[in-house]
Image (tube, rainbow, N blue to C red):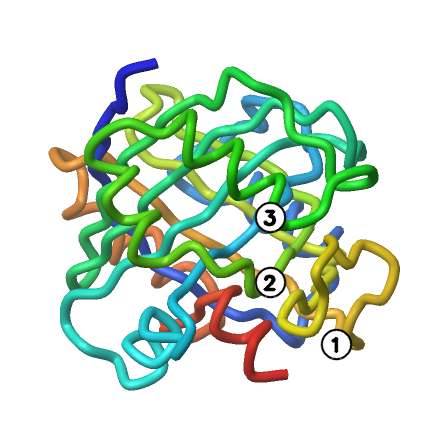
Amino acid sequence: MIPVKTWRYEYKMVTGSLTLDELKTKVLLHPMSFIERYPPRRVNNIYFDTNDLANYYDSLSGVSYRSKLRFRWYGQSFSDIEGVMELKEKKGMLISKILQKIDKKINLIDSNWAQIISVLENELVAPLNLDFCYACMPILINSYYRYYFETNDGSCRITLDSDLKVFDQRLYNRPNINFPISIDNRVILEIKSDEKSNCRLREIANYFPFRIAQNSKYTSGVTI
């Protein structure tokens, strides 16, 4: 598959005072008439970085341009995974993603990291293969349950992420999918728009009683 590049604007909020059900109700009562467009599903990511965690420290220090490399799939399975490699680049509130579907299935149960990395190296094409050569160390797996809401015209989206699980990979030569790191019960609210509708993000965000904040699930997972 030829990599595809997409663009969007994004705000993030960490909610603490409202439950997931309360947040879902509040989103559906938003004056911009959000609807639950897609069924909720579990999102899973393997985050890759350099040996010295260059991407992590760029995010931690808040440099204006930074990137993350991850393999993403959906559902409960850790075997016979059909996923997508993503290079996510961030500059301010503007996000770009380069996406490549990985045709060969990945098995996190019966494979070690060397075998998984070899599969990805053979599958990836430019420009993702170049980034993977630079940052191919598996650092973290995370998993969360995501709800999707959109405006009627599809130009703006809200997602709610809950039940976050984090699995550190730094001391393992095989995928660690059995020993999660303890985390709190936070819900992450993300507001996203296409390039033409970014002026509506602030209006959408002002409806919620939370502050816009930098929040990277990868950075938070490594820091825990």
Closer-to-camera residue (175/15): 175
**Badge 1 element:** loop
Q: Is residue 29 visible?
A: no
Q: Quadrant of the N terminus?
A: top left
Q: Circle 2 is placed at which residue position? A: 140
- What kind of residue is marked 2? Leu
Question: Looking at the picture, does residue 133 appear above or below residue 116?
Answer: below
Residue 52: x %, y % from top left: 39, 79
Q: Circle 1 is placed at which residue position? A: 184
Q: Circle 3 is placed at which residue position? A: 114
**Badge 2 element:** strand
Q: Earlier in the sequence, mark 3 or mark 1?
A: 3
Q: Is residue 99 visible?
A: yes
- What kind of residue is marked 3? Ala
Which of the 4 image quadrants contains residue 122? top left
Q: CA distance from mark 2 to mark 3?
A: 15 Å
Closer-to-camera residue (142/186): 142
Marks 3, 1: nearer the viewer: 3
